[in-house]
């Protein structure tokens, strides 16, 4: 796979696919970490004499419809501030734009283009005709075969990996392909159905598997405890039990919570109630792990050689149900293990508890991070590898 830093960029028109899918409220970007992460790529291209054209998606607009609420214009404004030079914002770009070396432009939301989600070859060809070099730098979208991540790479004169994508892949490779034992994975989330395949794949890679959130509720139910009004997927209890049996056969420990924090309603004002895991009442729902469970997980993480973290352990958005996730974050931060974290909720938790500097590697991707954990070839990476042939 070619890397952008290996190429002669002088006088070249670069089309760089970044992941600028950032939260925007009332026209203001509330978290610009993904923009900051892309700055080294942009600066490297400029320093080497290239013309820089940037493209990204934002949100999930109806394809082919210009939705002002999902315009990338605020991103262009913020990028100008961060980069220290003007970033042109181009609404109508697919037919080509007049630019010169040293200039930077951000194109409007690629999902406004018909054919983006379908990986349309004609749209990919049109994108490819804009550039001399296509640079895939958006790990967060690498698991999607779409026009701006896949088809354009197929038809561009040259296609390569950007520094951000390269760094993501190398860090994940280090943590997952050559990990230091014992290996502990922490997988949280609301539904076990969305992560059942990754949980199964992790059994062949880890020594211990900590589950959290609604996923943990399924494991608690599969272990024979009554979770009462808690969020879970009853039709997957048997599948969860089978996974637990597979884990036991593979000598992988999946610790079941000893105690939990419950509430009688799901709200930011709900009163937290600590319960042993076998004492949840009929009108209560589990929203976090309890202190005994948190202490058990902390001991596991202290002894880890490698930690992979994706997903919170409870409803951490409500402070009274965030203690478990906060304790987890602090334990990972204190652990001497090589730690990797990825996924939107995970990044939010890392920000909330201020542990970013103590996590070995924080991935910008969510779905891509999970698919990499599963051992899948990411489509946008796979197409770059074929371009070397």
Image (cartoon, rainbow, N blue to C red):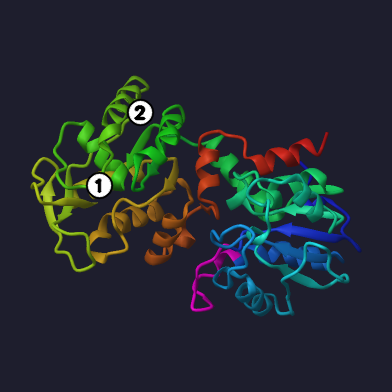
Q: Quadrant of the C terminus?
A: top right
Residue where numbered disc 1 is placed = 231
Residue 387's disc is: none
Q: What secondary structure is marked by label 2?
A: loop
Q: What secondary structure is marked by label 1?
A: loop
Residue 289 visible, this orientation: no
Q: CA distance from mark 2 to mark 1?
A: 25 Å
Which mark is in front, 2 or 1?
A: 1
Relative placement, left or right, of 350 versus 103 is left
Q: Residues within 10 Å of mark 1 (few under 14, many from 20)?
A: some
Give the residue furthest to the front. 65
**Is 226 within the magenta?**
no
Which mark is first along the chain, 1 or 2? 1
How far from the left and from the top, in percent, is residue 24?
A: 51, 72
Please give the range of residues in magenta. Answer: 21-34
How far from the left and from the top, in percent, is residue 68?
A: 58, 73
Residue where numbered disc 2 is placed = 252
Residue 37 visible, this orientation: yes
* Above-or-below relation of 76 to 216: below
């Amino acid at each position: 796979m070619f890397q952008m830093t290996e190429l002669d960029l002088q006088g070249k028109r670069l089309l760089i696919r970044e992941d600028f899918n950032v939260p925007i409220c009332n026209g203001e970007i509330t978290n610009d970490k993904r923009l900051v992460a892309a700055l080294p790529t942009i600066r490297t291209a400029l320093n080497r004499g290239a013309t820089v054209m940037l493209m990204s998606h934002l949100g999930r607009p109806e394809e082919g419809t210009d939705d002002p609420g999902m315009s990338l214009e605020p991103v262009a404004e913020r990028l100008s501030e961060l980069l220290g030079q003007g970033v042109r914002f181009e609404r109508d770009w697919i037919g080509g734009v007049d630019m010169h070396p040293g200039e930077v432009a951000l194109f409007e939301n690629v999902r406004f283009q018909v054919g983006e989600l379908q990986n349309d070859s004609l749209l990919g060809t049109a994108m490819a005709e804009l550039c001399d070099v296509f640079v895939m730098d958006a790990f967060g979208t690498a698991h999607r075969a779409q026009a701006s991540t896949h088809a354009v790479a197929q038809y561009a004169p040259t296609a390569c990996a950007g520094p951000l994508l390269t760094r993501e892949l190398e860090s994940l490779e280090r943590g997952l392909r050559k990990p230091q034992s014992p290996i502990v994975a922490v997988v949280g989330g609301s539904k076990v159905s969305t992560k059942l395949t990754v949980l199964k794949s992790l059994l062949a890679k880890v020594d211990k598997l900590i589950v959290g959130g609604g996923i943990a509720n399924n494991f608690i139910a599969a272990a024979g405890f009554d979770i009462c009004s808690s969020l879970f997927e009853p039709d997957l209890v048997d599948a969860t039990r089978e996974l637990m049996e597979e884990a036991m056969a593979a000598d992988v420990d999946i610790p079941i919570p000893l105690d939990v924090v419950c509430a009688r309603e799901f709200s930011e004002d709900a009163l937290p109630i600590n319960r042993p895991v076998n004492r949840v009442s009929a009108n209560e729902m589990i929203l976090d792990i309890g202190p005994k469970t948190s202490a058990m997980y902390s001991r596991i993480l202290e002894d880890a050689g490698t930690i992979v973290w994706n997903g919170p352990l409870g409803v951490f958005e409500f402070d009274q149900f965030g203690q478990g996730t906060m304790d987890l974050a602090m334990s990972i931060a204190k652990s001497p293990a090589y730690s990797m974290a990825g996924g939107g909720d995970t990044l939010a938790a890392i920000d909330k508890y201020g542990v970013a500097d103590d996590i070995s590697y924080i991935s910008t991707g969510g779905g891509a991070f999970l698919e990499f954990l599963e051992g899948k070839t990411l489509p946008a990476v796979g197409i770059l590898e074929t371009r070397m042939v």
